[in-house]
Image (spheres, grey):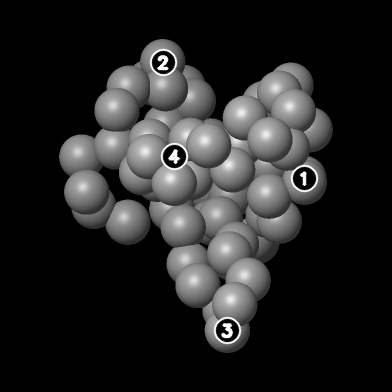
């Protein structure tokens, strides 16, 4: 299982880190995992989300 940092997620999607953090706070991006104070994203979950058009997170991580 591969995890992405906010920076690598932002690069993958082609957005600024600031926008990625905003979407994180809003709960838009699925697959988030807290590791201490850090946040990582399950790459597989993010890729499926992107393939489905980046629809709003349904709350299932």
Q: Which residue is mark 3?
A: 36
Q: Residue furthest top?
A: 53
Q: Residue furthest bottom?
A: 36
Q: Residue at x 63, y 71 (%)?
A: 38
Q: Which residue is mark 4?
A: 29
Q: Are discs 4 and 1 less than 8 Å apart at CB?
A: no
Q: Earlier in the sequence, mark 3 or mark 4?
A: 4
Q: Earlier in the sequence, mark 3 or mark 1?
A: 1
The 10 Å Cα crowd at callout 4, few under 14, some 14 to 19, many 20 or more, is many
Q: Which residue is mark 2?
A: 53
x%, y% of residue 23?
48, 35
Q: Residue at x 74, y 28 (%)?
A: 16
For the C terminus, which image quadrant? Answer: bottom left
Compared to 22, does 53 lie above or below? Answer: above
Compared to 40, does 7 lie above or below? Answer: above
Q: Which residue is mark 1?
A: 8
Compared to 54, does 6 lie above or below? Answer: below
Tell me how far mark 2 sits from mark 4, CA to CA. 12 Å
Q: Are discs 2 and 3 less than 8 Å apart at CB?
A: no
Looking at the rendered structure, the secondary structure element under dot 1 is helix
Nearer the viewer's eye, disc 2 or disc 1?
1
The 10 Å Cα crowd at callout 2, few under 14, some 14 to 19, many 20 or more, is few
Label disc, if present, on residue 19 of the rendered structure = none
Q: Earlier in the sequence, mark 2 or mark 3?
A: 3
Tell me how far mark 2 sits from mark 3, CA to CA. 30 Å
Tell me how far mark 3 sits from mark 4, CA to CA. 19 Å
């Amino acid at each position: 299982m591969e995890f992405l940092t906010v920076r690598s997620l932002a690069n993958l999607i082609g957005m600024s880190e600031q926008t990625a953090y905003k979407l994180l706070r809003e709960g838009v991006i699925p697959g988030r995992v807290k590791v201490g104070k850090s946040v990582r994203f399950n790459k597989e979950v993010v890729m499926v989300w992107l393939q489905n058009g980046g629809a709003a997170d349904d709350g299932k991580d």
